[in-house]
Amino acid sequence: MSDLLVVRNLGKVYPLARGEYHVFHGLDFEIERGEFTAIMGVSGVGKSTLLNLLGAVDRPTEGQVLFDGENVFTLPPLRRARLRNRKVGFVFQFFHLLPEFTALENVCFPVLIGGGGWPQAKERARRALEDVFLADKADMRPRQLSGGEQQRVAIARALVNEPQLLLADEPTGNLDWSTGEKIIRLLLDLHSRRGLTSIVVTHNEKVAAFCRRIFLMDAGGLKPIPRT
Ligand SMILES: Nc1ncnc2c1ncn2[C@@H]1O[C@H](COP(=O)(O)OP(=O)(O)O)[C@@H](O)[C@H]1O
Ligand SMILES: [Mg+2]
């Protein structure tokens, strides 16, 4: 089987003070190993909610996500946490770096959380920073870095544990177009060099043009956009 992700009847409802908010239901799709997929759709439609479910950060109200054949939400919590730590890398719009720590330390955290010690974490973080061409800025704090550099640190952090799946939630949404394009090129390059499966949420038509497969999310769910 070459699908990395199999999504079946996936639904998410947020409880609100007054009733419930139904974000989506009945999502069914597969993501093939090695695929680079874009998800588009207007703000508030549920793209981040979906990525959080695919990355096992949040739980669905109904349905299943099979990751490499494993039913993510019936795994015991520790095994699910391990899957998230080792097999999934996340990149966000606002980078989410810890401001008090250096670039190198930020990249170390997923290794430390996974049970590695500082020497191993630092060695792997240095390599990950080399992969995003930031080895020379390892000791800088996020505020000393440009937006594009901060996003490259975040990409190094997402990849330091050598995940199978990379999830990027509007990774260029906070960057100017030319910096954003460099980030997308870097993601595409890392995607093929590391044999990743990547899913990128984006509003940018040009960014989506780099992808092999595009889904449009709307109130009716998730539909593949036919490619010419
Ligand atoms: N933790 C939450 N509690 C309640 N409602 C939420 C929560 N997170 C998101 N929502 C709502 O769910 C909908 C989808 O949000 P989101 O997945 O962030 O959309 P998108 O990423 O497409 O902009 C929005 O209406 C949002 O307000
Ligand atoms: Mg979002």
Image (cartoon, rainbow, N blue to C red):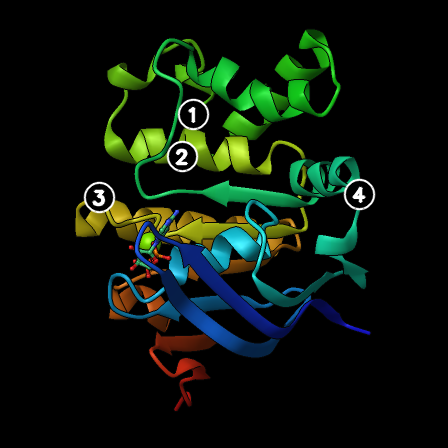
Residue 152, label in figure? 2
Provide the secondary structure element on which disc 3 rests: loop
Number of dots carrying numbers:
4
Instruction: Give the left or right position of residue 126, taking residue 85 as reference.
Output: left
> Mark 1 and mark 4: span between their CA atoms?
37 Å
Residue 197: x %, y % from top left: 61, 59
Mark before the other along the chain sequence, 4 or 2: 4
Tell me if residue 141 can be seen: yes
Mark 2 Cα shell of 10 Å, populated few (<14), some (14-19), many (≥20): many
Residue at 35% over, 52% down: 16
According to the picture, the residue beneath numbered tag 4 turns out to be 76
| CB within 8 Å, label 3 to label 1 | no
Instruction: Give the left or right position of residue 85, taking residue 17 as reference.
Output: right
Residue 1: x %, y % from top left: 82, 74
Ligand number 1: quarter of image? bottom left
Camera-side residue of 145 and 110: 110
Question: The disc labelled 2 sits on which kind of residue?
Answer: Arg
| CB within 8 Å, label 1 to label 4 | no
Mark before the other along the chain sequence, 3 or 4: 4
> Mark 2 and mark 3: span between their CA atoms?
12 Å
> Mark 3 and mark 4: span between their CA atoms?
38 Å
Instruction: Say which of marks 3 and 1 sits in front.
Output: 3
Mark 3 Cα shell of 10 Å, populated few (<14), some (14-19), many (≥20): some
Mark before the other along the chain sequence, 1 or 4: 4
> Mark 1 and mark 2: span between their CA atoms?
8 Å
